[in-house]
Image: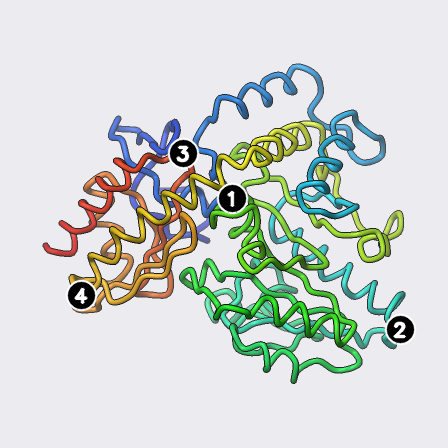
Amino acid sequence: MSHVAVNYRPLPVTIASGEGAWVTDTAGKRYLDLLAAYSAVNFGHRHPELIATTTEQLGRITLTSRAFDNDRLEPFAEALARLCGKELVLPMNTGAEAVETGIKVARAWGYRVKGIAPDAARIVVAAGNFHGRTTTIVSFSDDDTARVGFGPFAPGFDRVPFGDADAIAAAITDDTAAVLVEPIQGEAGVIIPPEGYLRRIREICDERNVLFIADEIQAGLGRVGETFACDREGVVPDLYLLGKALGGGILPVSAVVGDRDVLGVIRPGEHGSTFGGNPLAAAVGLKVVEMLETGKFQERARMLGEHLEAGLQKLVGQGVTDVRVAGLWAGVDIDPAIGTGREVSERLMTRGVLVKDTHGQTIRIAPPLVIRATEIDWALEQLRVVLAD
């Protein structure tokens, strides 16, 4: 009998080790990992540069708390700010913490800069969103699994359809402090908005004196073939919310990144974290930024994503009803006649391929960016066989 609380329903596989795009279970069977811990393992399991950085830092110091400065934090913040084209970095740990931090920053900016009346600030969000599962975040979710039974809910959010910029414009009032969206919705099934959606949000926010907050926690840091998903439309938000891959698949690292006139509204004591910006996290985060600055991983995601999409398109009509691909990230809708997304995931697992289902009929594919084209081909063949069976 397990002593782990049942807040997940994992596939029946127990992983013991991993390297690159592969993991091995406790019985010694190898699997091709096409989930990469929801993009947290973008650089592969145990990437040598990241392991070396971690090992070196472990031999020096791991935690000081923010009661003191540490010698890794400023280099990390400087590099991440440069990668984002921004001025300030507020380090946290998990993606949900980054979102909560972004909400607080937006409200503080609304009161202290825009002049919204106390406790009246509102934030426009998108239907189908997934920003985490804290009580504040589920307050503006429409996912009943995460929401029902956990009220009362926090006020101050206005939800509109995803991909509809006109609906965002209509929802904004004088009390609106920010628009918060995922540039591509991951948990919803890799839902890609219409071309121009992000550009129009940027225009609307500029016109109405509202912050544009982009949750790039899953989509960012190389996954979609660009450093950020917003780069696909040449858009720069006021705040980036980052996480997952920022920790190199080694430990939780997240951050809110923005310019001084926005992120600078937070004052000492108003927000913090004992572990946020710790020396170990900062050292790993700095190495992640340095790896992204080469552009190599973005290029791999672009090229291999095209290869993946071409292979998936061949399966449309053969057990697949639709595919959506952005870089090396895909949502694959399974024909109900074949089975559910969960059932297809379980069948793939028996053939040595790990994916994850979402929303009933969809499986998500998000392999480490170090995967090879031949490995993608092998995984697609396993999917073809599973669909045919």
Disc with the residue nearer the chain's start (4 vs 2): 2
**Can you tell which of label 1 and label 2 is closer to the viewer?**
1
Tell me the quarter of the picture where residue 344 sits: bottom left
Q: Which mark is residue 317?
A: 4
Quadrant that contains the C terminus:
bottom left
Q: Which mark is residue 147?
A: none
Residue at 68% across / 71% down in the picture?
A: 203
For mark 1, give the secondary structure.
Answer: loop
Left or right: 93 in relation to 147 = right
Query: Within 10 Å of the Cα at label 3, are there few (<14), some (14-19), or many (20+) other Cα atoms?
Result: some
Query: Within 10 Å of the Cα at label 1, are there few (<14), some (14-19), or many (20+) other Cα atoms?
Result: many
Disc with the residue nearer the chain's start (1 vs 2): 2
Residue marked by disc 3: 370
Disc with the residue nearer the chain's start (1 vs 4): 1
Q: Mark 3 is on which residue type?
A: Val
Provide residue 333's location: percent of width, then percent of height.
29, 63
Left or right: 33 in relation to 247 = left
Provide residue 353's location: percent of width, then percent of height.
26, 42
Quick check: marks 1 and 2 in contact, CB under 8 Å? no
Q: Which mark is residue 115?
A: 2
Q: What's the image's color scheme?
A: rainbow
Q: Image height check: is 385 above or below 151?
A: above
Residue at 56% across / 31% down in the picture?
A: 291
Left or right: 153 in relation to 104 = left
The extreme left residue here reads: 389
Residue marked by disc 1: 222
Q: Mark 1 is on which residue type?
A: Gly
Q: Image height check: is 70 above or below 246?
A: above
